[in-house]
Image (cartoon, rainbow, N blue to C red):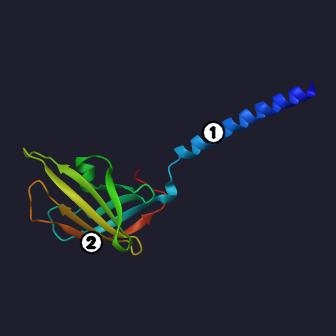
């Protein structure tokens, strides 16, 4: 009789242990990998004064997922929130972050602005370029700046 109760108790204990392991695995997978996310606050000096290069850019980069988010004055004005960006590590370890903003004010046609930021993670130096593919403009605003890492902050 005691053998049957002991076997039943062990079986229930095993089931309970499996439930705890599964619940822990689900909880761990729901938590984003913050350790791979770095947020940069960049101060930029533009080479032109027409407003295409904002004086501040905030980027969150998730190196493991190869994604990024970007926020500057133009994004805030036209989109209203941080925008997803493409992320890639290019030559000698630089981070390349690309995003687009559709500029549509009172003009009947909107203008697409393609932004590309290149960040050197070792020195935190940044280069920012803007291109306008829809109108084939020769104007290519550029800016340079320096970024600082924001601890515990993310745009994701």
Please give the name of the residue rendered at 9% of the width and 59% of the height, measured from the top-left corner. Answer: 136
Callout 2: SS: strand
Query: Where does residue 113 sit, x and y in percent of width and height?
Result: 18, 55
Q: CA distance from mark 1 to mark 2?
A: 49 Å
Residue where numbered disc 1 is placed: 22
CA neighbours of label 2 inside 10 A, class few (<14), some (14 to 19), many (20+): some
Of 32 and 40, the residue lying toward us: 32
Of 105 and 96, the residue lying toward us: 96
Q: Is residue 87 left or right of residue 79?
A: right
Query: Where does residue 100 sit, x and y in percent of width and height?
Result: 23, 53
CA neighbours of label 1 inside 10 A, class few (<14), some (14 to 19), many (20+): few
Please give the name of the residue rendered at 68% of the width and 38% of the height, measured from the top-left corner. Answer: 20
Q: Reply above or below: 61 against 46.
A: above
Q: Of label 1 and label 2, which has the lower sequence position? A: 1
Please give the name of the residue rendered at 53% of the width and 43% of the height, measured from the top-left corner. Answer: 30
Q: Which mark is residue 141?
A: none
Q: Quadrant of residue 63?
A: bottom left
Please give the name of the residue rendered at 36% of the width and 59% of the height, measured from the top-left corner. Answer: 59
Q: Which quadrant of the figure contains the N terminus? A: top right
Q: Is residue 2 left or right of residue 49?
A: right
Residue farthest to the right, as pictured: 1
Q: Reply above or below: 80 against 13.
A: below
Callout 1: SS: helix
Q: Quadrant of residue 70?
A: bottom left
Residue where numbered disc 2 is placed: 144
Query: Where does residue 151 sit, x and y in percent of width and height?
Result: 48, 61
Q: Is residue 80 left or right of residue 137?
A: right
- The mark closer to the camera, 1 or 2, is 1
Q: Quadrant of residue 60?
A: bottom left
Of 72 and 18, the residue lying toward us: 18
């Amino acid at each position: 009789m005691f053998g049957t109760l002991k076997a039943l108790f062990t079986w229930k204990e095993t089931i309970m242990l499996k439930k705890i392991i599964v619940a822990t695995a689900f909880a761990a997978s729901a938590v984003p990998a913050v350790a791979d996310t770095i947020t940069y606050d960049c101060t930029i000096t533009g080479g032109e004064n027409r407003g295409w290069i904002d004086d501040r850019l905030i980027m969150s980069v998730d190196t493991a997922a190869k994604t990024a988010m970007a926020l500057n004055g133009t994004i805030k004005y036209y989109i209203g929130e941080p925008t997803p960006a493409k992320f890639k590590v290019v030559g000698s370890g630089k981070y390349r972050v690309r995003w687009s903003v559709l500029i549509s004010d009172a003009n009947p046609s909107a203008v697409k602005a393609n932004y590309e930021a290149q960040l050197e993670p070792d020195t935190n130096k940044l280069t920012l370029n803007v291109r306008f593919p829809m109108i084939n403009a020769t104007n290519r605003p550029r800016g340079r700046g320096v970024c600082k890492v924001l601890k515990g902050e993310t745009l994701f």
